[in-house]
Image: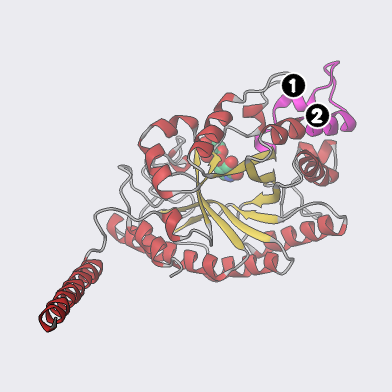
Amino acid sequence: MRYSVDAGARHYYAIFFFCVFAIGRVSHADETQHPPAVAESLADAFRGRLKIGAAVEPAQLTEADGSLLVRQFNSVVAENAMKPADIHPREDTYNFAPADTIVDFAQRHHMAIRGHTLLWHKRTPDWFWIGKDGQPASRELVLERLRQHINTVVGRYKGKVYAWDVVNEVIDASQQNCLRNDKWMQVVGPEYISAAFRDAHAADPFARLFINDYSTHEPAKRDCLVRVIKGLLADGVPIQGVGHQMHISIYWPSVSSIDSSLTAFAQLGLENQITELDMSLYQHKDYRPATSLQQRLTFQGQRYGAVMALFLAHREVTAVTWWGVADDHTWLNVGNDVPGDDQPLLFDRSQQPKPAYWETLRGRPL
Ligand code: XIL
């Protein structure tokens, strides 16, 4: 009897020492393995706190970016496929296939979907402005077409797209009324914005509706956006959040200016989402690098760490979406006036994690 108790005790001692040894090995491995061989999932790291998204074109889904997307992200947005001129090229023709491809992929992989965008001056198809007789379309006809467009697109993805960028880039701080002086203003007047939000809400009452814009850290732009949103809220327009594109650089803007902007909208009781994040290695339109690539990539990592820490400190920030999956596909490298070698995202051109990835991950909630 005594013998068997001793044997049991020895047995437990053996298990105890084995566990101490094993835990020691694991924690030792954690300390020294930076970066680990296999990247942790960003989506998992921020689950329950932030949705982690990326913009995609349908063709990327079957390529290397597609598998990286599934491993690292839990939200998607169409880089172009849902824009009005892309999804609705003629009044009687919808081109749903590219957007459907992205939505089906996201659903198969249990990812959230943002919708971008229902109205944008740059991608409003010309047919919107031309009447049946070839004359300029009337205000009423344009508003009716907007209603039809929004009803059809939002209706099609009802219950699938959880948030819409209802209007994109409507603010212009150099205008007295803060609104861009585009066709929408000229033909409809400022009410096109409230009309778009009401139409979207009617088509899907559960979708969260955003006003999306760039350079929202600039005080004049931010103040204009606040003014326009206050007007919408006073009129009872259904708007839940502000989308901050966040096309930034390793050189600008200051983190504190982003902080002030997020705070301004939080104080209005709105949700903030970062909708198109990328961080250029260049100054704005100045492509002479001041330091080595290595230094800029390191600095990019530090800046990503700093902005992520800021987003996490803002409870009303609910999602961060990058404008691309990896550096092999970014809009910043398209065009004749750019060098084409910018690397603004978290993963390099071979889908490998960059310093930007590790620093973004570092701020994850424990
Ligand atoms: C860009 C796409 O990335 C490009 O492929 C396209 O040629 C032009 O539009 N702000 C926005 C996005 O709201 O829709 C833009 O996307 C980038 C700037």
Residue 187 vertical placement versus 293 (above, below): above
Q: Residue at x 16, y 76 (%)?
A: 8
In the rendered structure, does residue 133 fall within the stretch colored magenta? yes
Q: Which residue is mark 2?
A: 145
Q: CA distance from mark 2 to mark 1?
A: 8 Å
**Where on the picture, by quarter, is residue 81?**
top right
Residue 127 screen position, x and y as percent: 74, 23
Q: How many marks?
A: 2
User: For the residue marked with disc 1, what is the amino acid?
Assistant: Glu
Q: Camera-side residue: 56 or 137?
A: 56
Crowding near pointer 2: few (<14 within 10 Å), some, many (20+)? some
In the rendered structure, does residue 86 fall within the stretch colored magenta? no
Magenta stretch in the rendered image? 120-148
Q: Residue at x 80, y 55 (%)?
A: 176
Residue 99 screen position, x and y as percent: 58, 31
Residue 305 vertical placement versus 165 (above, below): below
**Mark carried by residue 91:** 1
Comes first in the chain, label 2 or label 1: 1
In the picture, measured across the screen, residue 180 lies left or right of residue 262, that is right
Which quadrant does ligand 1 occupy? top right
User: For the residue marked with disc 2, what is the amino acid?
Assistant: Arg
For the view shown, which residue lies furthest in the front direction?
1
In the picture, measured across the screen, residue 199 lies left or right of residue 363, that is right
Residue 92 screen position, x and y as percent: 74, 18
Disc 1 C-beta below 8 A from ligand 1: no
**Where on the picture, by quarter, is residue 158?**
top right
In the picture, measured across the screen, residue 60 lies left or right of residue 211, that is left
Q: Residue at x 74, y 41 (%)?
A: 204
Q: Does the residue at mark 2 contact the one at mark 1 (Cβ under 8 Å)? A: yes
Residue 90 screen position, x and y as percent: 70, 20
Crowding near pointer 1: few (<14 within 10 Å), some, many (20+)? few
